[in-house]
Amino acid sequence: GENVEQHPSTLSVQEGDSAVIKCTYSDSASNYFPWYKQELGKGPQLIIDIRSNVGEKKDQRIAVTLNKTAKHFSLHITETQPEDSAVYFCAASTNFGNEKLTFGTGTRLTIIP
Amino acid sequence: DTGVSQDPRHKITKRGQNVTFRCDPISEHNRLYWYRQTLGQGPEFLTYFQNEAQLEKSRLLSDRFSAERPKGSFSTLEIQRTEQGDSAMYLCASSSAGLTDTQYFGPGTRLTVL
């Protein structure tokens, strides 16, 4: 089955700086890669996703890149703000999300004011 | 608010007791997923439904676990004879099967087995 690895497990950045979180996946059939943000006591909230026919996607301060050959994808957050502090999870799925998601182990991002 | 809702939000039970959780998906979403999340880990897939049909079950879902979605709307997840290892956050997500599917998660039910 699919295996998703995520690094780093913790990340602290100064407010205004950029943060990068990286994930690798094992199943070449995976074609959908969402990123979720989870705040304490809440369920995961989708922040951005990318499909295998696209190499990069951007939404304001958030961007995701995908390298299918290397089987890795990354989340980039620019101009970080205190409200970006949370746990971030990457995930992978086949059938463009119409199947189960396999999640990474999460990255706890702390923005230092 | 028309998001995914889960009830209860917290459940404390004694080992050996049965518990049941409910999930109400976003209206008209035909797919419903259950995941389990332990502390410091990502959610792990348990099972999912398309309408009332249960399409896949994880090996994590032992015979003490059963899920239903009788009318293709809300779903229940029952755990029989709970064990301390069942303590976790149980998350429900829903999506609308199609070309581009996003799974929207509910707030979860936190289960503590004493």
Image (cartoon, coloured by chain):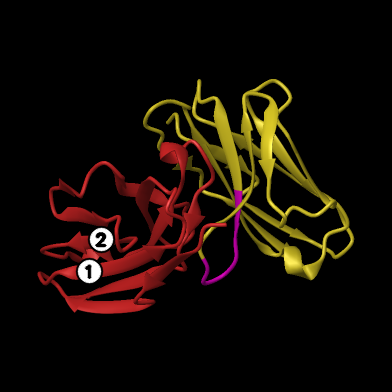
Chain colours: A red, B yellow
Q: Are marks 1 and 2 in contact (CB under 8 Å)?
A: yes
Tell me, yes or no, if residue B80 can be seen here.
Answer: yes
Magenta-drawn stretch contains A11: no
Looking at numbered disc 2 in the image, what kind of residue is underneath it?
Leu
Residue that appears at 42% across and 55% down: A91
Residue B21 left/right relative to A29: right
Disc with the residue nearer the chain's start (1 vs 2): 1
Q: Quadrant of residue A86?
A: bottom left
Q: In which quarter of the image is residue B76?
A: top right
Q: Position of residue A72 (x, y in %)?
A: 32, 62
Locate the C terminus of chain A by quadrant: bottom left
Q: Position of residue A100 (x, y in %)?
A: 54, 45
Identify the residue under disc 1.
Answer: A20
Residues A51 and A15: in front is A51
For label 2, the crowd category at 10 Å Cα-Cα, with few meaning under 14, some 14 to 19 and many 20 or more, is many
Looking at numbered disc 1 in the image, what kind of residue is underneath it?
Val
Per the rendered image, the range of residues in magenta is B35-41
Residue A70 left/right relative to A42: left
Q: Where is residue B60 in the image (x, y as percent from the top left)?
A: 71, 57
Residue that appears at 50% across and 20% down: B28
Q: Do labels 1 and 2 share a chain?
A: yes
Tell me, for residue A75, which label it has, or none.
2
The answer for which chain carries disc 1 is A
Query: What element does badge 1 sit on?
Result: strand
The answer for which chain carries disc 2 is A
